Image (cartoon, rainbow, N blue to C red):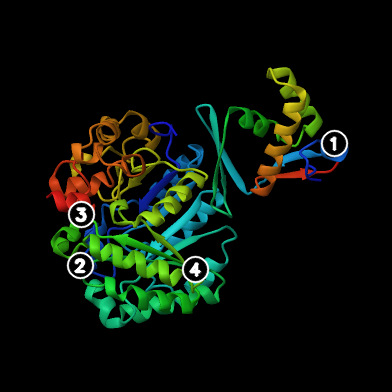
Amino acid sequence: MSPCADNELDANFLASIPIQNPKVVSRRERDETLVFHLNTVRITVLNWVASRIWELCDGKHKVSEIYETLLSEFEVDPKVLEKDLARVFQELKQRDIIVLRSE
Amino acid sequence: MMGYLETPIQVAIELTSGCNQNCVHCFAESYPKSPNDLLSELSFEEIRDLLYELSSMKVFRVVLTGGEPLLRKDFFEILKQCVALRLSPSITTNGTLITKHVAARFGEIDINVGLQISLYGATSEAHNKFVVTDGAFEKSIRGIKNLLTSGITPSVSVTVTKLNYREIPKLTVLVDSLGVRELHVLNLVPSGRGRQIWSSVLNAQEWLWIFNTLCHMSLKMRIIFDLKPYLPVVPSGYLERITADMVQRDFEFVGCPCGRTWCTVLSDGKVTACSYLRDPKFYAGDIRTAPLERIWKESLVLHQWRGDTLYQLDELCRSCRFLDLCRGGCPAAAYSFYGIMRSPDPRCPLAQIMS
């Protein structure tokens, strides 16, 4: 399931489990994360918030749990976080650096 | 991005200093060598240990180069190690040793292997002005065809000088017709033997001719050009496109990446910021005596290199309107030509005019 077009989080998306694509290699570089795709040979730079999301894409957390974790860790409006999270996952999926597994 | 990365994202390993060609412009001054000439080269075990270290440092990309890297009998063992360690391999080769069997072995690799083959013209005569080796052109073309048959699409690189820049349109048509999808157009480097043919370096008008010609050809062809002209030669209408392209890249380290995101390990284990910097005074260390990560972090040579080239540019560069995009060009070229790495890149049209 991918995020719906208007960037809100639907139930299926919230229940899905994001996993880092095994075809990528990532590393922390100060407060950013560099993600390298072995097939596309493309490097994506994640800022510190996206880096935290990336860490949580470990196959153990549903999107809803990642949302709750971020809400507890960052001072952010819940609606803003919803939109930001949907946008980040859409971007990560487009770049083929995560896959979303349905439960 | 910051001044330099905590560990490099790309490391070039010169697997050998030997080559089966003797190109007139070779910055590494490679040529056919006897086994006795190659005794100081890194062994398979030393390269394997280096690859383990690169993997633990989370280096993304390894460039296997030389000399001619395919001359090493253990080349595919080294390549397999890269793949097993999830180090993305990129290979620079003249392609002459890529037989059907060799191409098939490349085809067996299950991750993206970047293969870049050098050509210097569209005919044997034009090519051989550079490589000075009989039959080399036909063998390189055969290598490209063999790779394509095995499902690998190589890119082609061409170093342009006054000797061959008018060949570029014919070369483009040739490689496009073969099925190559990317042509890297490179400038002459005044290092090694490149210094000896420096009088053939292109001037602004010649670069502009290439730029306009390739822009025109790109409208009708599928091939992608990787061309980094010196910005003062770019017509103003194109500048916004180039600038936008740079901004949209995923990871862009403006200016010279050497010593900041990349480094090179020479065939005897010496480490330099850049393949073009082969003067022993630029050796940052030796992987036979220290881990690469320590060299990267602690080498005074690298620290000086990073500081000098970033902050102490010549006035010509500091006052240039392209400074934010160019950052002074290639410091190794400046050093090789002027003996001072803070000098302007000697290939820059503005620097050529001023000198």
Q: What label sits on residue B24 in the rendered view?
A: 2
Q: What label sits on residue B181 in the rendered view?
A: 4
Determine the chain carrying the residue at label 4.
Answer: B
* First along the sequence among labels 3 and 4: 4
Say yes or no: labels 1 and 3 on the same chain.
no
Left or right of B273 in this view: B97: right
Tag 3 residue: B191
SS for dot 4? loop
- Residue B134 visible to an observer of this rendering: no
Q: Give the amino acid at mark 4.
A: Arg
Nearest-to-viewer mark from 1 and 2: 1
Q: Quadrant of the N terminus of chain B?
A: top left
- Residue at (40, 74) in percent of width and height: B172
SS for dot 1? helix
Q: Is residue B289 above or below residue B31?
A: above
- Residue at (33, 56) in percent of width and height: B234
Q: Alpha carbon of mark 2 to alpha carbon of mark 4: how far?
A: 27 Å
